[in-house]
Image: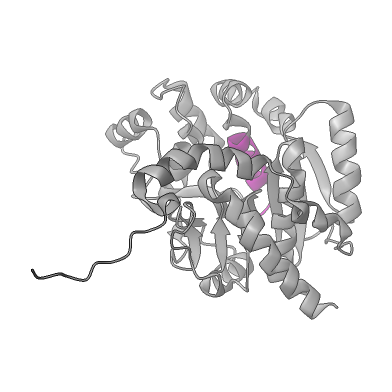
């Protein structure tokens, strides 16, 4: 009888069915476990930021419980992009209208980033009400609506570098530095798998002559001042041609506006939006090659377990 060599069976927890069965409870546990490194950002020396005339305003948005993540994200971009003559301002939009939560967030944030601003996400919604009622209504009622209001309002004030609170910058970014220095073009992330968008709005916009990009993720954006027109966003949302239950209406509106403005994608192999490494034992990206990574929900544990420790080691080596 002839025998053949066989590959040893993978451990049970790496096999397909078991891995998928474990994914949801592991995600739940990983997001809620007390990662000590998240709070290590409060022990770092304060990072003063520019006020007055700045090259661009770095803007991030966070719920009160995610303020520590936003601080890591902001600090990573300030380390990598804030240069003499090209200074970045910093604004945190805190997703609350509760005065005590705002006061506490302002105290913590300005302790870490002297000179930074803290605003409520409800401020731009109220300012948009008179001239864009459909946009304001969407912003008040949709989970991602206030993000859309923040981006549109902030880019009217000056050049905008927007990041979600789960985006980290690992090394110098010539693409973003050049865009800030030159005032354009708009830049954005590509996402593995194409555009996560609201299909109904994409179809409607296409019929109206608004092309959508093949891929776009709105977690990292550079938007020159006045590039996006609030009136265009109002027309799209006033049409009612979108699924109110879709998580991606905001991203679709921004994708349509940025495409119309001639936005250019960032190199996807260095500016990563990917679920690589989401499963235990699965292949992850090589962080030495990354400029940024958007740690979306399936890979949030990699932000805490790999991304933050890597940044902390680098910063301590530079400033022992």
| Observer able to see residue 86 | no
In this rendered view, identify the residue nearer to me: 152 or 193: 193
Q: How many marks?
A: 0
Above or below 142: residue 69: below
Answer left or right for 177 relative to 270: right
Answer left or right for 314 relative to 178: right
Above or below 101: residue 74: below
Where residue 41 appears, as percent x and y from the top left, is: 81, 57
Where residue 102 appears, as percent x and y from the top left, is: 85, 34
Residue drawn 82% across the image and 43% down it: 118
In this rendered view, identify the residue nearer to me: 78 or 35: 35
Task: Based on the picture, tell me whether residue 205 belongs to the magenta stretch.
Answer: no
Task: Based on the picture, tell me whether residue 156 belongs to the magenta stretch.
Answer: yes
Where residue 16 appears, as percent x and y from the top left, is: 35, 48
Region of the chain picked out in magenta, as a range:
147-160
Name the quadrant of the N terminus: bottom left
| Residue at the extreme front of the image, as rendered | 1
Does the magenta stretch mainly form a helix, a strand or a loop? Answer: helix
Q: Colour mode?
A: one colour
Name the quadrant of the C terminus: bottom right
Above or below 14: residue 242: above
């Amino acid at each position: 009888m002839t025998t053949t060599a066989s590959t040893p069976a993978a451990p049970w927890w790496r096999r397909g069915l078991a891995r998928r069965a474990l994914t949801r409870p592991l995600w739940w546990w990983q997001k809620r476990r007390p990662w000590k490194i998240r709070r290590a950002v409060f022990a770092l020396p304060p990072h003063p930021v520019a006020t007055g005339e700045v090259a661009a305003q770095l803007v991030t948005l966070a719920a009160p419980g995610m303020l520590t993540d936003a601080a890591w994200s902001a600090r990573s971009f300030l380390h990598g992009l804030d240069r003499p003559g090209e200074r970045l301002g910093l604004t945190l939009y805190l997703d609350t209208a509760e005065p005590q939560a705002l006061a506490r967030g302002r105290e913590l944030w300005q302790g870490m980033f002297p000179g930074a601003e803290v605003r409520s996400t409800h401020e731009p919604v109220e300012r948009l009400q008179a001239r864009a009622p459909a946009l304001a209504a969407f912003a008040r009622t949709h989970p991602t609506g206030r993000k859309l209001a923040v981006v549109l309002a902030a880019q009217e004030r000056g050049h905008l570098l927007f990041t979600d609170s789960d985006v980290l910058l690992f090394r110098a970014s010539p693409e973003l530095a050049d865009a800030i220095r030159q005032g354009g073009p708009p830049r954005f992330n590509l996402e593995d798998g194409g555009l996560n968008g609201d299909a109904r709005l994409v179809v409607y916009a296409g019929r109206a002559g608004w092309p959508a990009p093949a891929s776009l993720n709105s977690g990292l954006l550079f938007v020159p001042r006045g590039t996006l027109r609030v009136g265009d966003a109002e027309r799209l949302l006033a049409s009612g041609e979108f699924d109110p239950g879709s998580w991606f209406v905001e991203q679709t509106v921004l994708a349509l506006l940025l495409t119309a403005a001639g936005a250019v994608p960032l190199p996807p192999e260095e500016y990563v939006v990917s679920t690589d490494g989401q499963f235990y034992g699965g292949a992850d990206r090589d962080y030495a090659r990354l400029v940024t990574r958007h740690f979306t929900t399936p890979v949030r544990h990699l932000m805490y377990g790999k991304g933050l420790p890597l940044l902390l080691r680098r910063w301590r080596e530079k400033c022992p």
